[in-house]
Amino acid sequence: MNYYMWTVGCQMNVADSRSLADGLERLGYVVAAKAEGADIIVLNSCVVRQSAENRVASKLGALKTIKKLRPHSTVALMGCMVGADVFELHERFPHVDMFMSPQSFKPLLDVAEKRMARATSFEYTASAMPPTAYVPIIGGCDNFCTYCIVPYRRGREKSRLVSEIVREVESLVARGSKEVTLLGQNVDSYGHDLPDKPDLADLLETLNNVDGLARLRFLTSHPKDMSNGLIGSIARLAKVCEHISLPFQAGDDEILVAMHRGYTIDQYRNLVERIRNVIPSAAISTDLIVGFPGETDSQFEKSYALLEELKFDMVHVAMYSPRPETYAARKLINDVPPDVKKERLDRVEVLQEKIVTGISAKLLGTTVEVLVEGSKKGRWYGRTRTDKLVFFDDERDLLGHLVEIEVKKTGPWSLQGTVI
Ligand code: SF4
């Protein structure tokens, strides 16, 4: 029997899909490349942005015919599209059998187990893992940024025990993973709800000792919570990569208050300075929203100026769109016209391309360590410790290997080089 899984959204969704896939494979299911013909079809949804929600809705629509042709298949929708009240979803998508909120996929595994018990016997072989894997360490979020739906869909912060995380990382490494990214909506909050209150720095320290693991990353940090202790650990621990995801969201203090972000731009600027003082090679990526309710031209210009000043390695920029249930959707007026939002987004993208072109150019002729993640069109690709994408040619099977690459060509979105 087989399953098809389609995932959209953040790395947390990718990690949830992997856990569910592991569970299904333990039951004897094999992965299918297409929804047509699959016994179990799962869509793991995201509604953080309107574009993601539209993609899920169109994918769900397409499944209607598939379900009609194969009524015995089980169609499940999970992830952030599924809130507490699923009545409306039932009405809109009657061909979906199960609705499961994020990480609550146990009912599907129960159904899958029953279906498998009725089918033939099987022998389970754990699939090999890709060289990189995601491991959630804390779910939910307590911050309630006014634009964000995560606390409503993923609930309050809940940390996993250190021992449980270590076991999962060891199992991933035993199956071939070399790099693990620890996930949380706000990883810096890790552990505050556990009895002995370990923090992220403690967890990194423990995981740094896992044999066979080559690299550790973590996502996403919150500027109001990132401690000096954590910055010190990143600098000190050999396996922790010098790559920090630190959203600033807006360059204007009034907008930051309206977003309920809990820091000022000066505090953010000081934090970046501290990181760069302690870890000069650190790559910092960020998130930015343009066109938040009430954002004036001059307030946007402050975001633009901050990008010019701090020169991030990567910027994820999004146009504001109201997410139902959130404070901003209920109380604030979405008053920035769509064409103004688009113009601001385009300006950010043009600026950022120029900035990353300059950052990448500095790597020309240097040697970088790359973990080989796969091949595309006959070329190997992988990432540096600072998360730069690198392509190179080599006859050998280097999947999962750490290789030293001399950078021969640079561009805004990737580097090219040769193995030393
Ligand atoms: S920190 Fe804010 S933006 Fe991030 S998940 Fe929590 S509420 Fe959402």
Image (cartoon, grey):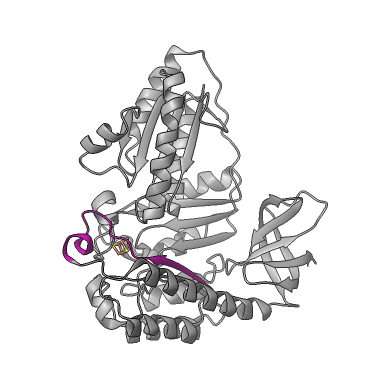
Q: Is residue 162 above or below residue 124?
A: below
* Residue 274 is covered by the magenta coloring: no
**Coordinates of residue 152 in the picture (x, y in percent):** 24, 52
**Quarter of the rendering containing residue 281:** bottom right
Query: Residue 253 or 380: which is nearer the viewer?
Result: 253
Q: Can residue 60 be seen at all in this image of the molecule?
A: yes
**Coordinates of residue 383 in the picture (x, y in percent):** 63, 62
Q: Can residue 164 be seen at all in this image of the molecule?
A: no
Q: Is residue 161 above or below residue 363?
A: above
Query: Residue 314 or 154: which is nearer the viewer?
Result: 314
Residue at (68% x, 79% y) in the render: 361
Residue at (29% x, 50% y) in the render: 154
Q: Which image quarter has ligand 1?
A: bottom left
> Outermost residue toward the left?
331
Which stretch did the figure color magenta?
313-331
Taking the image as shown, residue 418 lies to the left or right of residue 353, namely: right
Figure quadrant of the C terminus? bottom right
Q: Is residue 410 above or below residue 306?
A: above
Residue at (27% x, 72% y) in the render: 261
* Residue 330 is covered by the magenta coloring: yes
**Quarter of the rendering containing residue 380:** bottom right
Number of numbered labels in the structure image: 0
Query: Residue 138 or 411: which is nearer the viewer?
Result: 411
Residue at (25% x, 75% y) in the render: 294
**Coordinates of residue 82 in the picture (x, y in percent):** 29, 42
Taking the image as shown, residue 301 lies to the left or right of residue 94, namely: right
